[in-house]
Image (spheres, helix red, strand yellow):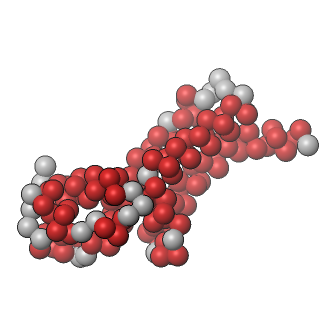
Amino acid sequence: MDNKEAIIQAAIKLIEEKGEHLEEVTVREICKRAGVGLGLVNYHFGNKDKLIEQCIERMINGTVKRFQNIREKTDSFTSFEKLEYLSNMTLDFLFEHYAVSKFLFLPICSHRKKMTTLTELMRHIFRLLQPAVLTLMKRR
């Protein structure tokens, strides 16, 4: 694993460990865990915030990939079962990655890259929920 990847992996682990206390993650702590010098964070990412953004984007992209594979798993589900399954999956992610959900929904999430990633995740969720929602609307 190269230094950049080691930094990303160390930062992701710290983000997951610190939970809602994301502000407590320090560059010094990340570098110590990654076994690299302090200057490499600035060299590879520019600053700590950009590193954290990249880590969170990677975490979300993993969830997006899981959502892309759900359609096959839920083909035999009723509309309500799909809705429940996807809702639970979304909530599980947000609770398991509290720091990520907090980061995404803060006012600073107006950065285009974060919003693009969040928008992509939401598009996948809505695409998968659409049949269930349409069924519910028809029943009203």
Residue at 38% over, 52% down:
59
For the C terminus, give its image quadrant: top right
Q: Residue 10 at what x, y percent from top left?
A: 22, 55
Residue at 59% over, 54% down:
123
Residue at 45% over, 47% down:
96
Count of picture labels: 0
Q: Residue 36 at what x, y percent from top left?
A: 9, 62
Q: Is residue 64 left or right of residue 29?
A: right
Q: Is residue 113 left or right of residue 72?
A: left
The residue furthest top is 76
From where the camera sits, is residue 122 visible? yes
Q: Quadrant of residue 130?
A: top right
From where the camera sits, is residue 58 visible? no
Q: Residue 110 at what x, y percent from top left?
A: 51, 75
Q: Quadrant of residue 30?
A: bottom left
Residue at 14% over, 56% down:
34
Q: Is residue 10 above or below residue 131?
A: below
The front one of 32 and 9 is 32
Q: Is residue 31 left or right of residue 92?
A: left
Q: Residue 61 at what x, y percent from top left?
A: 42, 51
Q: Is residue 40 left or right of residue 46?
A: left
Q: Is residue 72 above or below residue 25?
A: above
The front one of 115 and 107 is 107
